[in-house]
Image (cartoon, rainbow, N blue to C red):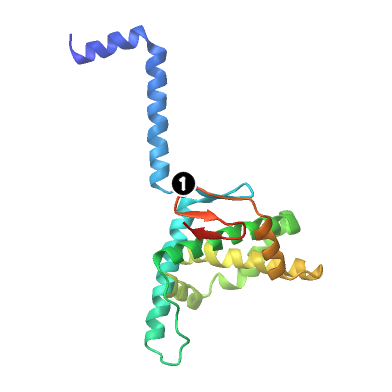
Amino acid sequence: MTLWNRFQHSYKKSPRLWASGLFLLALLIVAGALAYLGFYPIAFVNGSVIWARTYQENYRYAGIYYQNLRRAAATQTTTVPIADLSSKDLEVAVLNALVTRALVDQAAGREIGSDLDQMVNEKLANYENDQQLQMGAQTLYGMPYPDFRSEILVPQARADLLSARLYLRGVSMDNWLSDSLSKAKVTILSSDFHWDGAKVVAN
């Protein structure tokens, strides 16, 4: 009996078992592809997901920006010295920035509601055709403008809008952030880091 004949015989005896096996195999392939592309969580912030892909991209851009700052500082004796950061320091800084971004996004959504995206777009409208800004984003961060917009400009616009709403209530952004970080429910899905109750720290 050939291998093909054995497969046909086995399939006829247990079609449901074979179907289940193929389904599980397909799931494993899809899961592997998603993991390879970074579509798996690296942290949760009050239930919101920080995706590994987002973290990886921000880490890469932060590294480019940091190296550019160091090169610029090395050529200018009057520049304030740039602190030496290890790769672990940079990873921690990026994770903390993403936790802060998640908290800001959540609060801005509560404070402003369904008008948030429209207000952000209006705030950024003047930048859309700014060629100098787009060139600067590419030079400093190594980021194409769409990434610079989504990863830098949009989060900053949301933070500015939230800060304005808090100001009307007599609350400073710094005090709000400190309080929000201390109350946040943060889970880090990496053995390299943990949440100490107020920030991400390396293990």
Which residue is painted at 74% across and 59% down in the image? 112
Does residue 175 appear in this view?
Answer: yes
Residue 43 placed where, x, y %?
53, 50
Residue 203 image point, x, y percent: 46, 56
Q: Is residue 117 visible?
A: no
Residue topped by disc 1 = 39
Q: Secondary structure at mark 1?
A: loop
Residue located at (27% from left, 14% from top): 7
Residue positioned 37% across, 35% down in the render: 29
> Relative to 198, is 31 above or below?
above
Specify whether 15 is left or right of 43.
Answer: left
How many labels were placed on the picture?
1
**Direction bottom: furthest residue:** 78
Image x and y of residue 89, in percent: 45, 66
Residue reaching furthest left?
1
Instruction: Locate the N terminus by quadrant.
Output: top left
Residue at left 45%, top 67%? 62
Q: Residue 58: where, in percent of width, then height?
A: 47, 61
